[in-house]
Image (tube, helix red, strand yellow):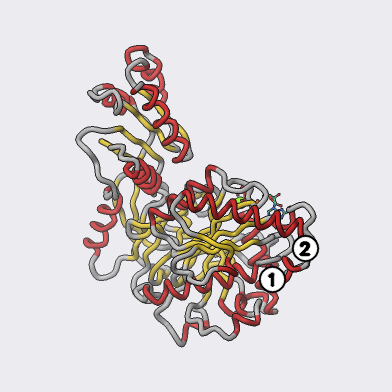
C-alpha cells in the first residue's frame, strides 16, 4: 500500500472508514461493487486498491465522477469502504472502545423498505453517534422505472411518468416516517439544506449506476465535516487496528485480518494482541494484501508489502495468532510496551455499560455486540446485572436462577451458542420453570420478545 499521493498536502488526515450496513440481501455488496466499478472510469486501473476486508477508493476517482465535485476543496485522501456481511460485523469492528467506522451507509431496498436489521443498524449507529447516509437502492426495480445508465438521480427521476414519480415519493416518504419513529429527521438528499441536522436519503441503483455519484457526493460532504473535527486521526505513529477475523491460511498458519485505523504497521514490528489467554506479543512476519484482479490466477493469492498506513485492511502473519479474539485491538508496540499491553487488557474488559445490582444476565459473541444490546436495554430502562462475552455456560444458568425478582430472572444469549451442559440444565424443570431464556441475533427482536413476555407476566 502506498501513501495516497494527495496526502502530500495534508499528511495528517487519514482515509475515513465507511461501513456499509443493512438488511440481508438488500444490496450492500452490489452497491460497493458499483462504487468500485464506477470509480475506475478515471482510467487509472490501479487507482482502486483492494484490501483485506475493505476497498480504498481514492478521492480523484470519486470526484472525477461528477463535475460539481471537482470544484470542491477536499482534503481527505479517499474513502475506505468496509462491507459488513452480517450487521454484527459492525459492532465487532471497534476502535478505542467505540465504533471503528467514521461514517456509514445504511442500505435499504426501496421496494421492501425498512426491515429488522435495518432498524437495528440505525439504532447501533445512533448509539455510536456515527454519521450516516441512507442509500435507498434497487431503484431500477420500482415497477415502470425507466433507467438511464449512470445518471444522477434527479436527471433520471425527471424522465419518469407521474405514476412512477409518485410511487418513489411514497417509498421515500415511508423511509422518512420510519426514521422519524427512531428519532431521526431525514429528507431526500436534494431537499436537505442542513446536512448536520437532517439525514440524507439517496435513491440509487447498483445495477444501473443511477444516483451513485449523488451518494458519493453526500458521503464526501459528511467525511469533510467529520474529518475537520478529527484531525487526530493520523498516518504517523505506531499502528493501531482491530481484528476483523482470525483465519487459517495454507502455508502461513493462523493469520489475522486487521483494519488499521491509525498509524503505520511494518514487517518486523512487535505487536500486542488479545488472545483467549490474555494479552500477548508477537513479531510481524509478513503483511499481505490481495493481488490485483488481473493477477488472480497466480498461485500465491497475496502480495507481500513492507508497511501499511492507516486506514487500510491488511492480513498479518506472525507466530502465535491462533488464539487471537476477533474484534479485539491490535497495537504496534512503540516506546511503552507495558502501557500498550495494559491498554489492550483494559479495552478487553471495559464494557461501556452500567451494570445494576439487580437485573438480567446477558451473554454475547463480542464486546461490541454486548455493548449494543446493553445500550438498547438501558434505553428501555431494563437493568443488566451481568454482561459477558462467550457462550452460555452452566454457571450462567445457575446464576440466573438465583435472581430474586422474576422480571429479571432472565438469561439472554445474543448471537452466541449455548454449551451442551447449559442446554441440559435449561431443560430441567427446576430451571425451565424458573428462568426465562431468550436467544437471537437481532437486538430489536430480543428486546421485543422480552417486553412482550414481561407484559404478560405483569398481567
Ligand atoms: P448479504 O451480504 O447477503 O447481506 O447481501 P447484500 O446486502 O450484500 O446484497 P447483494 O449485494 O448480495 O444483493 C442481493 C441481491 O439483490 C442480488 O441478487 C443482487 O443482484 C440484487 N441487487 C442488489 N442491488 C440491486 C439493484 O440496485 N437493482 C437490482 N435490480 N437488483 C439488485
Ligand atoms: Mg453482501
Q: In this view, does 57 lie above or below 93?
A: below
In the figure, is residue 177 to the left or right of 373? right
Of 326 and 211, which appears nearest the observer?
Answer: 211
Q: Which residue is drawn at 31% across and 44% down?
A: 277
- Report helix, strand or loop for mark 1: loop
Tell me the quarter of the picture where residue 167 sits: bottom right
Q: Which of 373 and 266 is in front in this view?
A: 373
- Residue 51 visible, this orientation: yes
Q: Residue at coordinates 41% horizontally, 55% vertically from top-left?
A: 126
C-alpha gap between disc 1 and disc 2: 13 Å
Q: Which residue is drawn at 65% across and 53% down?
A: 170
Above or below — where is 409 with respect to 279?
Answer: above
Foreground residue among 237 and 128: 128
Q: Which of marks 1 and 2 is nearer the N terminus?
A: 1
Position of 12 relative to 20 (above/below): below
The residue located at (40%, 62%) in the rendering is: 241
Q: In which quarter of the image is the C terminus?
A: top left
Left or right: 43 in relation to 322? right
Tell me the SS state at disc 2: loop
Q: Image check: 156 left or right of 336? A: right
Residue farthest to the left, as pictured: 357
Are there few (<14), some (14-19), or many (20+) residues within 10 Å of tag 1? some
> Tag on residue 152?
1
Q: Mark 2 points at which residue?
A: 160
Disc 1: residue Cβ within 8 A of ligand 1's nearest atom: no
Q: Is residue 287 visible?
A: no
Crowdedness of circle 2 by 10 Å Cα count: few (<14), some, many (20+)? some
Residue 125 found in image quarter:
bottom left
Foreground: disc 1 or disc 2: 2
| Residue 255, x across and y down, in percent | 47, 54
Q: Please indicate whether residue 258 sits to the left or right of residue 141 in the image.
A: left
Question: Residue 177 location, x and y as percent?
Answer: 54, 51
Amino acid at each position: 500500500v502506498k501513501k495516497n499521493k494527495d496526502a502530500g498536502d495534508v499528511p495528517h488526515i487519514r482515509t475515513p472508514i465507511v461501513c456499509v450496513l443493512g438488511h440481508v440481501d438488500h444490496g450492500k455488496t452490489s452497491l460497493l461493487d458499483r462504487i468500485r466499478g464506477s470509480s475506475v472510469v478515471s482510467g487509472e486501473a490501479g487507482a482502486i486498491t483492494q484490501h483485506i476486508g475493505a476497498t480504498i477508493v481514492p478521492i480523484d476517482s470519486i470526484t472525477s465522477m461528477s463535475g460539481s465535485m471537482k470544484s470542491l476543496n477536499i482534503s481527505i485522501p479517499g474513502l475506505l469502504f468496509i462491507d459488513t456481511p452480517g450487521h454484527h460485523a459492525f459492532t465487532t469492528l471497534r476502535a478505542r472502545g467505540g465504533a471503528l467506522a467514521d461514517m456509514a451507509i445504511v442500505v435499504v431496498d426501496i421496494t421492501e423498505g425498512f426491515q429488522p436489521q435495518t432498524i437495528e443498524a440505525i439504532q447501533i449507529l445512533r448509539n455510536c453517534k456515527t454519521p450516516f447516509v441512507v442509500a435507498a437502492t434497487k431503484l431500477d426495480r420500482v415497477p415502470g422505472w425507466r433507467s438511464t445508465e449512470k445518471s444522477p438521480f434527479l436527471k433520471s427521476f425527471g424522465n419518469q411518468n407521474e405514476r412512477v414519480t409518485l410511487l418513489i415519493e411514497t417509498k421515500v416518504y415511508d423511509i422518512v416516517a420510519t426514521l422519524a419513529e427512531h428519532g431521526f429527521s431525514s429528507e431526500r438528499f436534494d431537499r436537505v439544506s442542513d446536512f448536520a441536522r437532517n439525514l440524507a436519503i439517496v435513491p440509487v441503483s447498483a445495477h444501473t449506476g443511477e444516483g451513485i455519484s449523488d451518494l458519493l457526493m453526500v458521503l464526501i460532504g459528511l467525511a469533510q465535516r467529520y474529518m475537520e473535527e478529527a484531525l487526530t486521526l493520523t498516518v504517523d505513529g505506531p499502528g493501531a487496528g482491530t481484528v476483523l477475523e482470525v483465519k487459517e491460511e495454507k502455508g502461513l498458519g493462523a493469520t489475522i485480518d486487521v483494519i488499521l485505523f491509525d498509524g503505520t504497521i511494518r514487517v518486523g514490528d512487535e505487536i500486542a494482541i488479545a488472545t483467549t489467554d490474555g494479552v500477548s506479543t508477537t513479531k510481524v512476519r509478513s503483511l499481505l494484501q490481495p493481488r490485483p484482479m488481473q493477477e488472480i490466477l497466480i498461485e500465491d493469492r497475496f502480495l507481500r508489502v513492507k508497511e501499511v498506513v492507516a486506514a487500510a485492511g491488511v492480513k498479518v502473519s506472525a507466530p502465535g495468532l491462533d488464539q487471537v479474539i476477533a474484534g479485539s485491538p491490535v497495537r504496534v508496540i512503540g516506546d511503552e510496551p507495558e502501557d500498550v499491553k495494559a491498554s489492550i487488557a483494559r479495552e478487553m474488559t471495559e464494557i461501556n455499560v452500567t451494570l445494576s445490582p439487580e437485573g438480567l444476565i446477558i451473554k454475547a459473541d463480542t464486546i461490541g455486540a454486548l455493548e449494543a444490546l446493553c445500550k438498547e436495554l438501558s434505553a428501555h430502562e431494563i437493568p443488566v446485572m451481568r454482561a459477558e462475552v462467550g457462550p452460555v455456560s452452566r454457571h450462567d444458568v445457575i446464576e440466573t436462577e438465583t435472581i430474586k425478582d422474576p422480571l429479571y430472572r432472565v438469561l439472554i444469549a445474543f448471537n452466541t451458542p449455548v454449551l451442551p451442559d447449559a442446554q441440559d440444565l435449561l431443560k430441567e424443570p427446576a430451571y425451565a420453570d424458573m428462568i426465562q431464556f431468550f436467544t437471537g441475533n437481532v437486538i430489536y427482536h430480543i428486546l421485543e420478545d422480552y417486553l412482550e413476555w414481561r407484559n404478560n407476566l405483569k398481567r
